[in-house]
Amino acid sequence: MAALPLRFVLLLLALGVIFVVSFAVGRYPVAPGTALAILASQVVPLTPTWDGNTETVVLGIRLPRILAALLVGAALSVAGAAYQGLFRNPMVSPGILGVSAGAGFGAALAILFGYGMVGIQLMAFVWGLAAVATTWAIGAAIARRGDPVLVMVLAGIVVGTLFTAFVSLVKFAADPLDTLPAITFWLMGSLASIDMPDLAAAALPIVLGIAALMAMGWTLNVLCFGDEEARALGLETGRVRLLVIVCATLVTAAAVAISGIIGLVGLVVPHLARMLVGPDHRVLIPVSTVMGGGFLLAVDDFARSLFAVEIPLGIVTAIVGAPFFLYLLRHSRRGWN
C-alpha cells in the first residue's frame, strides 16, 4: 500500500474528536469525560463515579449508534470510491447498480408481511444483492453489443427503476394507518433502532468488503485507464470488475440493511477525499473510509439534536450533501482518474 499522507493522520484525529463529542449529543446529558471513563471501565477496573442510567445511555444506546454511523458511512463512501474508479465516472454512487432500490424493496416487503427487525434487515440484504445480480446478468448478456461499462451502468439504472416501482407497489398495498408510515420511515434512513446484535451482523461483510477493496487499490488504478490498457498489463478485466462489484455491493447492501437508504454519502465523500489526496486508490480508499465514517457520524449528531423529533438521516444528507457536492464540482482542481 502506498504511504498514507499526513492528512490521513489529521483525519483520524478529527474522527476521534467527533467520536468523543458524539457521546455528549442527545436529550440525556453525558460529559465526554464521563463517557470515556465508562468505555474504559469495560477494559480496565475503574471505580464508578456515574449512575446506572448514564452507563445504559452510553453503552446501550449511544455506543451502538455511533459505531453504526462509522460503519455505514465508511461502507457507503468506500463503495462510492470503488464504483467511481471502476466505471470511470465521477457521478456514480453506490446505488448505481440497483442495490439501494433492491434493498428498499426487500425491506418494504418484509414490513408489509409483518416481519421483525431481523427479517427486515435480512430481506433488505438479500434483495439488494439480487438486484445487483440481475444487473450483472443483463449486462453480461448484452455486453457484446457495446461498451461493457456503459451497458452495466444503463442496466443498473433500469433495474433500479424497476425495483423502485416495486417499492411503490408495496406502498400502494400497505395499510395507510400502520404499515405505510413504517415503510416510508425506513426508506428515509435512520440509525435510531440500532443495537449491538444488528451491528455485529453487518460488521463482518462490511469489514471484509472494505479490506478487499483496499487490497485492490492498485487494480482499481489500472482499471481507470480503460480495459485495453488493463489487459495489456495482464489484468483479466471481466473477472476483476466482477470482484470489485461483489465487494462494493456486499458492503453497500449490509449498510443499507441496517440503516435504510441514505443518499449522497457515497457520492460526496469520495470527491472530497480525492481533492485531499488525489486519485490513487491505494490512498483514496483508506481516506474515504475515515472521512465517510466521520461525515455520517457528524450528520447523525446533527439529525438527533437539531429538533425535539429526530430527523431521518436520508433527509439530512440530501440537504447537506447536495449544495456541498455542487461546491466540490465548482472548486475541484484535480482530475478524478
Image (cartoon, grey):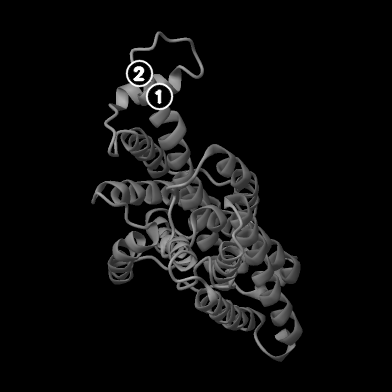
Residue with the mark numbered 1: 55
Q: Which percent across, then down, holds residue 145?
A: 71, 91
Residue type highlighted by circle 1: Glu
Do the residues under discs 1 and 2 have CB atoms within 8 angstroms?
yes
What label sits on residue 51 in the rendered view? 2
In the image as oriented, which residue stretches furthest toward the left? 307
Q: Is residue 133 above or below residue 54?
A: below
The residue located at (49%, 59%) in the rendering is 260
Badge 1 crowding class, 10 Å Cα cut-off, few under 14, some 14 to 19, many 20 or more, is: some
The residue located at (60%, 70%) in the rendering is 102
Front residue of 45/166: it is 166
Badge 2 crowding class, 10 Å Cα cut-off, few under 14, some 14 to 19, many 20 or more, is: few
Measure how far apart labels 1 and 2 are at the Cα level. 7 Å
Front residue of 197/252: it is 197
How many discs mark residues in the rendered view?
2
Dot 1: element: helix
What label sits on residue 29 in the rendered view? none
The residue located at (46%, 45%) in the rendering is 70
Q: Is residue 24 above or below residue 308?
A: above
Residue type highlighted by circle 2: Asp
Q: Which percent across, then down, holds residue 157?
A: 56, 80
Judge from the rendering whether residue 78 lies leftward or rightward of residue 134; answer left or right: left
Dot 2: element: loop
Q: Is residue 251 visible?
A: yes
Q: Is residue 280 visible?
A: no
Q: Which percent across, then down, holds residue 93?
A: 49, 68
In the image as oriented, which residue stretches furthest toward the bottom? 145
Q: Is residue 163 above or below residue 62?
A: below
Q: Is residue 269 above or below residue 2?
A: below
Front residue of 65/118: it is 118
Judge from the rendering whether residue 280 lies leftward or rightward of residue 25; answer left or right: right
